[in-house]
Image (spheres, rainbow, N blue to C red):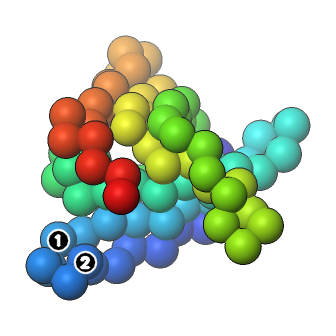
Amino acid sequence: LVATSRRTTTESGEFMQFITLVDEKGMCDLVLFPSICKVLPHVGIGPYKARGIVEEHHGVLVLKVNRIMDMRKNNRPTEVLDTQENYS
């Protein structure tokens, strides 16, 4: 479930999001880049499944999302895949 979400814009004016998900096992910080945000511009409460690359920034683990599934869409998960995979 989504605990916090912050939407911002890149220097080129595209949207990206920073999200914290929580479940019974803990918390996870996610980064959604513009290619994901174009398809999933707003996140609700969830639940979501996410995949990506885990990186450490200032002692915090962050998942740079390249695949996210909205598990509440009419009981049929909706998957968004980042085809650009630009994580630099």
Q: Which mark is residue 10?
A: 2
Q: Provide the secondary structure element on which disc 2 rests.
A: loop
Q: With 22 as the anchor, is 85 left or right in this view?
A: left
Q: Residues within 10 Å of mark 2 (few under 14, many from 20)?
A: few
Which residue is more in the foreground, 5 or 15? Answer: 15
The quadrant holding residue 79 is top left
The furthest residue to the front? 88
Q: Which residue lies at the image location 44% right of the left edge and 44% below the top edge?
A: 65
Q: In the rendering, which numbered label is found on residue 86?
A: none
At which x and y percent is residue 5?
52, 67
The residue pinned by badge 1 equals 14
Check the image and report above or below for 42 versus 57: above
Question: Which residue does the image show at 13% across and 79% down from the upper left?
Answer: 12
Residue 60 location, x and y as percent?
Answer: 74, 63
One can see residue 45 in this view: no
Q: Secondary structure at mark 1?
A: loop
Q: Residues within 10 Å of mark 1 (few under 14, many from 20)?
A: few
Amino acid type shown at disc 1: Glu
Residue 54, x across and y down, in percent = 60, 44
Relative placement, left or right, of 27 versus 54 is right
Discs 1, 2 touching: Cβ within 8 Å = yes
* Residue type for callout 2: Thr
* Residue drawn at 36 percent across, 58 percent down: 88
Image: 11 above or below 34: below
Instruction: Indicate whether 74 appears above or below 64.
Output: above
Residue drawn at 61 percent across, 51 percent down: 55
In the image, taking residue 11 as reference, residue 44 lies left or right, namely right
**Distance between the alpha carbons at the discs numbered 1 and 2:** 5 Å
